[in-house]
Structure formats: C-alpha cells, structure tokens
Image (cartoon, helix red, strand yellow):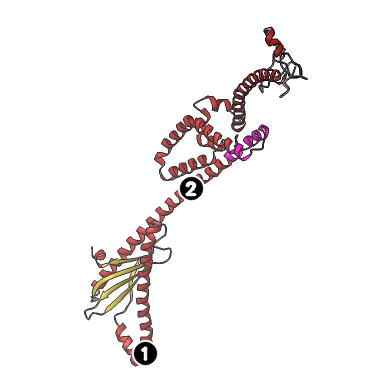
Amino acid sequence: MVCRNCGKQLQEGEKFCTICGYYNEKDSGTPTQQGNTNIDIVVPEEPPEMRNNNEFNEDNYDTKNLININNSLSDNSSQEQNFMNINYSSNNNLEINDNRYDRLLEAYVGEDYQEIVRKKINIYAFLFNLFYLLYRKLYVLGIVGLVILWVIGIKFSKLLIPYLLVIAFLSGVLFNPIYLKLANIKIKRIRKNNPSNDDFELMKICRKKGGVNVVIALLIYVIFIACIIFSMFSFNFNLKGRGKYWEANNNNRANCMYITKNSLLYTKNNSIEGELVEAACRKFGADTSFFDIYIKMKNFDGSVSYLFFQTGDQELTLTNNTVRKSTLENKKMTGTITPEETKQLEEIQEIESNYKKIKEESAKFDKQAVKDNDKTERTCYVFTKEELLR
C-alpha cells in the first residue's frame, strides 16, 4: 500500500504517512466507515389509550432526525480524525522546514560543513586566517584585514607580529559562529528574493553564492604581496635617496658657509668698506668646487652694494661689485656714459638681479623641504649676518 498524497510505501496496517502525515484509508476507492451508521430506536410500549391517539403513521414520520443523528456521529468521528491529522502534519512540517534549512545551509557552506556547524574552533581559520576568509568568499573582511596588515607592516613594523597573533586567535575562535550568522542572513535573502523557486533551485543558488573560491583568494593574495614588495622597495629607495640628498644638502650648505666666510675675510683684508647685511651662495655644476657668492653690504652713505665672488680650481676671486652703480646710472641718464661704462653697468645690474634670483630660489627650497623632507638636492642658500659672524 502506498500513500495517496506523496507516494511513500506504507507498511501493512499503517494508516498515517510518516512523511506527509496524510491519513490513508484501507479501501482506496471508498472511505472507511467509522462505526455503525444505523441506530436502533427502541420505542417503549405505550398505554392502550395513548397508543390509539399516537398511531404510528409512516407518512408523517420525520426521517430527517434520524439522518441528522447519523451525520452528527459521523462528523464527530471525522473531526477527531482531522484534528489528529492536523496535529501530526503541523509537527511534521516543522521537521520538514528544519530539514529544508539544513539542506540549504549545507549547500551554502559546502566543504567542511560538519566541522563548521559542530565545532567551536576552526583550525583552518586559525592557521590561514586572512587567506581563509578570502577562500570562504568573505572578501570584505579579508581585504580590510590585508590593508591593516599592509599599513602596520610599512609604518608600524613592531606591531606586525602581535597583529598576526591576534588575527589568528580571533579567526580560529570566532570564524564559525560569525560565518554561520552571515550564511543565515544570506540564505534568508535568497529565499526572499526567489519565492517561486523550489528547494532544488534554492540549493543551486546557495551553492553559487556560498562555498569556496580558491582562485580569487590566490589572486587577491598575489596582488597584496606585490603591493607589499613594491611598497618596501619604494620605501627603501626613498630612504636611500633621502639620505643621499640630505648628505649632499649638508655638504653644499657647509661648503657655501665656508666659502662665504672666506669672502668676508677677503673684504676685510682688502679694506672694502661697508657693513655686512646678508649673503647668498649658489652651487652650480656637478663639481663641488664651483660656487657663486654674493655679499650684500650697506655703505656709509646709506646705499647698498653687492660683492660678487666666484670659485674655480679651489680659488676665491672677487669678480665685480656694484659700488659704482649709482654713478653709472647718473651718467646714463645724462648721456655722458661711455660704451665701456655701459658694459660695466649691465654687469652690475646682472649681479643685483642674480642675487635676487638666488634669494627667491632659496625661499622655494625652504618651502619644498617641508613637503618632501630633503628629497631633492639644494643648491641655493641665504645666510644672515648672525649666521656668518657666529
């Protein structure tokens, strides 16, 4: 005998199906009669005087009462049977719903389903932590963990080992409950978004959304390792370059300071009058022995003049000065200037212009040094009177 609702093979004498809870009658064609539907009505004898008045009249006898009694008895037995069926089927539906969810969860989790569901500690998550998160398609958590690892490895290398230990411990202990909670949320979302799909289709979607993906996990890890290598190379390169330029800048400044002080000694030894205001120095060329030095002097009459020195072959030479600038400018205005004096005036004006250019370049280097932390070689310096007389 088979169940008429779901088709399960039933045992001999078994009426209720253990799968769907349907009540199967013995005779598949006609419903089983519950008890005897005929009721014997016993009519007590009446006194003769009443028997004549209440003569049994077959035409006037109401058979509806008898039919109603029959039906009520039959209905009572069928209601009791239906209640048993409903009660059994409701319990069975709970078990079926639980089994359906377990099947969907197993389809979503895929590999290591029993270990993730039953065990509290995940040894794979403990050993491979961030990679295991990516392997289990928890891409957001895995990538965030890798970014934090990258920042700590580059900027705070002392915290690298403690961070890895903490990640390993938390992954091993918390992975299973967190993963199951996320899986539950996604399964509910899948069932909500696919209300017309049967269990087979839902399981297919769960396998696609869940499970593992080793290819994407390896790809993300390769990109991460490449970023780490590039960052370390760039960081070391910048350190070496910074150290190189820092050393070169210090050497250039020291050489400029040394040559500028020698220029001041030259002015004293040659009785050049005037009070020191400030000085500017510029290195040019790859050789460290070539510098231009400009010393700004305040004359006794209140005018300003510039002394221009050059170095070459380890020699310091006073090339020109702007002491005669005002005289030559007056001659040019009156038209009495000679061609030689015109050439001298142009050289004097160029000296003053170069001094201003060196001062502007030095100010730019000062601003740039704050941004790039001595990543470029500095060739221009301006020294105050206090620095030179120190």
Question: Which one is in front, 307 or 245?
Answer: 245
* Magenta extent: 189-217
- 53 left or right, relative to 121: right
Q: Is residue 201 magenta?
A: yes
Q: Quadrant of residue 57?
A: top right
Question: Farthest front residue?
Answer: 49
Dot 2 or dot 1, earlier in sequence: 2
Q: Position of residue 149 (x, y in %)?
A: 46, 41
| Residue at the image position 23 percent from the left and 72 percent from the top | 268
| Residue at the image position 54 percent from the left and 40 percent from the top | 139
- 111 left or right, relative to 359: right
Amino acid type of disc 1? Thr
- 236 left or right, relative to 95: left
Tell me the tag on residue 231: 2
Residue 13 visible to an observer of this rendering: no
SS under mark 1: loop
SS under mark 2: helix
Disc 2 crowd rating (10 Å Cα; few below 14, some 14-19, many 20+) is some
Disc 1 crowd rating (10 Å Cα; few below 14, some 14-19, many 20+) is few
Q: Position of residue 75 (x, y in %)?
A: 66, 20
| Residue at the image position 22 percent from the left and 81 percent from the top | 301
Residue under label 1, please give it: 338
Picture layout, residue 20 above or below residue 11: below
Marks 2 and 1, Cα distance to the nearest angstrom?
A: 65 Å
| Residue at the image position 25 percent from the left and 67 percent from the top | 385
